[in-house]
Each structure stands twice: as structure tokens, then as C-alpha cells.
Image (cartoon, rainbow, N blue to C red):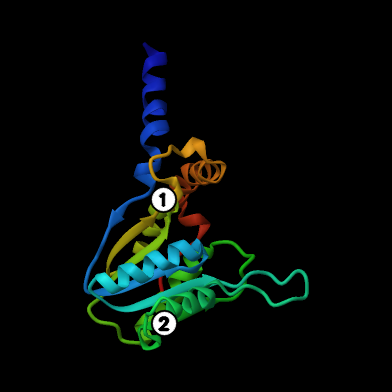
């Protein structure tokens, strides 16, 4: 009996955990924020969402990678902006929010905080924001942005790559790795705010 009680939640999480961690809760008539690290396919999905949705601005948010080889570091926010422009999004509808220190901790929080400050400076109204991210990182991003964007309506869209459709998370090493990370990362964020003392902007 005790074994069944223990295995029940484990079995449920095994089959339905990725779905829980990948929510879709759109908030219309506001800002679409896309996390720049999610790659070209994700950015193109953001372009489609912006064109078909009721949004006023599209924010690309991301950190800069560390320059370990003496070459130019990756700026994920700028890369996302470039791809969005190529996809037909007008430049005057895009706000690029690049965050220094890509190798540091709390990248989602720092990107959210920088986006919030930028939109405050832009005097963005109404206060609605939807963050678009990749797969089962969605639940954690939603939590972080909701804490940073206090007083705003916050939604989330979790992108799933086309070649993953109809497959289970354990059939992909990349998805399996992400699922394990977020299985640990989301409750840690929920309980401890990633160790941060305050989310005040």
C-alpha cells in the first residue's frame, strides 16, 4: 500500500510532468517578451505569435555569452531581434534588452528585471505581458516574471519544437535533460526565489 502511494505521484509526474512545466496562458493586448536563447525556431514562433496576436511591443530579452575564445560574444537578445526583423517584424515594434554577465546565475531573473525596467521607462500601458520560452522552462519563467512584474497581468507561452510533436520527453536526450533540470529548478524557484532576497524592481 505504501509503495503504491509513493509510486502514484512518481508515475503521474513521469507521464504528465512535462505538460505541467510547459503551460500556455496568453495575455493579450500588451507586450510579448521572447527569451532570446530559445533558438531560431522559437524566435520564428514568436514572430508568428506577434503578427497574429494583439500585442503592442515585442521585447527580446537575453544575456550575453562569455567570450572565452577572444572572439565576439553571443548577444542572445540582439540575435533574436535580427531574426525577428528578417521575419518581417517592424524595427519600431521591437525592444532589445541585452543583459551583461551571461555566465552568471539567475539569468531568467536578470532578463525579467531588465525587461521590467525598460518597459517602465517606456511607460508601457496597459500592464499586460506574455513571456515566450522553450518547453518545460515555461513554468519557471512564468513564476519569475510574475514576481518581477508585480501589478501586471503575466502570461506564458511554452514553445515546443516541431520535430518533438507526438514524441515523449524520454525519446529526446535534450528534452530529458531539460525535464530533469526543471523538475528540480521549478520547486527551488518557488520555495527560495533562487536564493534572492528581494524581487523588488
Tell me where residue 69 appears, x and y as whole percent. 78, 70
Whether residue 64 is visible to the viewer of this picture, yes or no, is yes
Mark sitting earlier along the chain (1/2): 2
Camera-nearest label, 1 or 2: 2
Tell me where residue 56 appears, x and y as whole percent. 27, 80
User: Callout 1 environment at 10 Å: few (<14), some (14 to 19), or many (20+)?
Assistant: few
Which quadrant is the C terminus positioned in?
bottom left
Which quadrant is the N terminus positioned in?
top left
Is 151 or 124 nearer to us in this picture? 124
Residue linked to disc 2: 95
Tell me where residue 107 appears, x and y as whole percent. 53, 64
User: What whole-number distance in Å separates the C-alpha atoms at marks 1 and 2?
Assistant: 29 Å
Is 134 or 112 nearer to us in this picture? 134
Tell me where residue 75 appears, x and y as whole percent. 58, 75
The image shows residue 93, relative to residue 99, as above or below, that is below
Determine whether the residue tagged by mark 1 lies in a helix, strand or loop: helix
Residue linked to disc 1: 190
Amino acid at each position: 500500500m505504501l509503495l503504491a502511494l509513493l509510486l502514484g505521484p512518481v508515475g503521474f509526474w513521469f507521464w504528465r510532468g512535462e505538460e505541467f512545466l510547459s503551460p500556455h496562458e496568453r495575455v493579450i493586448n500588451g507586450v510579448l517578451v521572447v527569451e532570446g536563447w530559445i533558438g531560431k525556431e522559437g524566435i520564428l514562433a514568436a514572430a508568428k505569435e506577434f503578427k497574429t496576436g494583439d500585442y503592442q511591443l515585442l521585447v527580446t530579452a537575453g544575456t550575453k555569452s562569455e567570450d572565452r575564445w577572444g572572439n565576439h560574444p553571443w548577444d542572445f537578445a540582439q540575435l533574436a531581434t535580427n531574426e525577428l526583423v528578417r521575419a518581417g517584424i517592424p524595427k519600431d515594434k521591437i525592444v532589445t534588452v541585452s543583459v551583461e554577465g551571461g555566465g552568471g546565475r539567475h539569468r531568467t531573473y536578470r532578463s525579467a528585471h531588465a525587461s521590467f525596467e525598460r518597459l517602465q521607462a517606456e511607460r508601457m500601458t496597459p500592464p499586460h505581458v506574455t513571456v515566450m520560452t522553450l518547453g518545460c522552462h515555461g513554468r519557471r519563467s512564468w513564476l519569475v516574471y510574475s514576481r518581477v512584474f508585480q501589478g501586471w497581468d503575466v502570461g506564458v507561452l511554452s514553445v515546443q519544437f516541431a520535430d518533438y510533436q507526438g514524441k515523449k520527453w524520454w525519446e529526446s536526450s535534450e528534452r530529458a535533460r531539460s525535464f530533469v533540470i526543471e523538475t528540480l529548478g521549478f520547486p527551488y524557484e518557488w520555495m527560495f526565489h533562487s536564493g534572492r532576497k528581494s524581487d523588488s524592481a
